[in-house]
Amino acid sequence: MNGWVNHLPIFPVVIPLVAGAVMLLFAEARRAPRTIIALVATLLNLLVALALAYIASDAVPSIWPDGIAVYLLGGWQAPFGIVLVLDRLSALMLVLNAVLALTSLIYALARWRKAGPHFQSLFQFLIMGVNGAFLTGDLFNLFVFVEVLLAASYGLLLHGLGEPRVKAGLHYIAINLAGSFVFLIGVSLIYGVTGTLNMADVAARASLLTQDERILFETGIAILGSAFLLKAGAWPLNFWLPSAYGTAAPPVAAVFSIMTKVGIYALLRLGSLLSGASGASVPAPFNEGWLFGMGIITLVLGTAGILTASQPQRLVAYCVIASAGTLLAALGFGGTAMKGAALYYLTSSVLATGAFFMLCEMIDRTRQTGEDLPLEMMEPVGQEPVDADFTDEVIGIVIPAAMAFLGMGFLACALLVAGLPPLSGFIAKFLILSATLTDTAPAPVPVTVWVLWGGMLGSSLIAIIALCRMGIHLFWSTDEIMTPRLHLGEAVPVAVLLLLSVALSIETGPAMEYLNLAGNSLSSPQVYIDAVLSGSRPPGPPAVPSIPVEGISP
Amino acid sequence: MEGIYALAIGVLTASGVWLVLRPRTFQVIMGLSLLSYAVNLFIFGMGRLMIGGAPIIETAAKADPSLYDDPVPQALVLTAIVIGFAMTALFLVVLLASRGLTGNDHVDGDPEA
């Protein structure tokens, strides 16, 4: 039993990989076997992620002490081979990804899988890349997994084709290719200085560098950080995001909403390792002041984008930017209490934007034309209609269930995104704002607290204004509103995501217990470093004896 | 050797960046290719430059690492080439699709922009 559990961390990578590969063998016309494989694989993925999170939360302390599992691939000892590392934070991200994957897969089965070939396989490969990026403990392996998820996302973004998608895809691929090259430069510079690619080992060796090496090392880290910030959608590296996310097919956009979190996760992971071990200051992109500043600017500009967006899906894309900004600012603010709160916000915002993307497409179907309305047409919502008689015929119509569902769904998403009570979005913002006060001295309130409070509350206000306007425009002021035919398979995933965020707000206590533990483990990176470098071996082929080679490190 | 090597990387990077910033899709893809060459050379250089060194250590006992080449950057470059090549090929396909759909080769699909 125990031996089997030790192999569990590799499953989030293996399951989607095998499923995606097997699905390629079936001809495009044979949808039934593909669908079954995809559903089974995604469900298994969720079960494995839940099991991992359960074990990582110290529920079974005999298996993995400190909630950190180290999986040595091929049995090679840690600094020499590639390792997968699972701790509470990565387990949380795995669960989030699995939930989002399952719901958007079910949503996609209703209509979207027919939009082009190999949707299912690409979808599984995307899940594999995201899972791998959350699990890996090695910088170059992180690059590989990020490329896997990007490659799959290129294919998925173009799914269903159409001119706007190709245009957005062109920009998206170009910017991400450039970003990947920047990533590689950073990784190889770090390798050149420290002689290792293992994240724990990099952190352990960072304190041993001489002054000259230190400069090169920090340059490498800074370059790497820029690549992470690009993936995270931080200003000024996020101009690709609205058009890419705003034009992607809805189930694709829903899984995309965790992709920016991969960048944030990488920043968080490497930043925590570097801050604890290196002794000296943390280089720029991981430095708290920088993160805070960029986060605030991202938040402000994302909020401005929410206000200007005239198309629902684009609006949600800007919500993703605003949530990335909030997260970066909260993480940049620092403090242990803040980390747990920021993780809560991350969970809530991923669920909310995922549901919102899917909901938007269903709402789009209520409009006959479906084209983007120019912003001017949305303006006179407060005025009386010119032809007052026109409204008479609407009186007395019973609200159909589909419209009621869409309206309630939109309301819930708006509350979640803007952070209004009673849903988890509000609790998340409240936790972040209260965490600013627990970590600072009471007498002179630092200016950063004011900036964060102002930014977050102002953004909430503007977001709710924009969302109200969008809601009125979508549900009330359209002349030719049609009751859409909703598939049960489309409504249920959205409802599940929304109910999960309701559950999150009801069970805030237990959730915060876990998230605080995850946040605390980020503040004590030495445990992570020790766990990786001591390398508890899984059962399997015997470890290759480590060759005493000197001079690999500079 | 280091000087020439650094110069080559610098020239490739500079040309690549300039081309990526051009408004035509073909120039962008050429720029991305040049950038990827520069990055691959850079990774290679991070393993220290050496001529005629073997990458595989023959005996575990009393090996002098200074006589051997660092095999890790070679493995990294191999992976980076494969990934970069595949992504560039994919970009080319999207470029052609964009050309077909918009009828011109501007990155925004609009020659006036």
Image: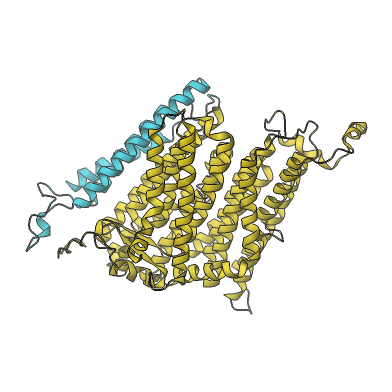
Instruction: Say above or below: A542 vs A363.
Output: below
Instruction: Say above or below: B36 vs A299.
Output: above
Instruction: Say above or below: A547 vs A468.
Output: below
Q: Is residue B57 left or right of residue A273?
A: left
- Name which residue lies at 65% across and 55% down: A499
- Given residues A337 and A445, the one toward you in this image is A337
Q: Is residue B56 left or right of residue B89?
A: left
Q: Residue A288 location, x and y as percent?
A: 49, 64
What chain is the cyan one? B
- Given residues B50 and A248, the one toward you in this image is A248
- Given residues A214 and B25, the one toward you in this image is B25
Name chain A's colour: yellow
Q: Residue A439 location, x and y as percent?
A: 57, 75
Q: Quadrant of the N terminus of chain A?
A: bottom left
The quadrant in which residue A341 appears is bottom right
- Given residues A427 and A291, the one toward you in this image is A427
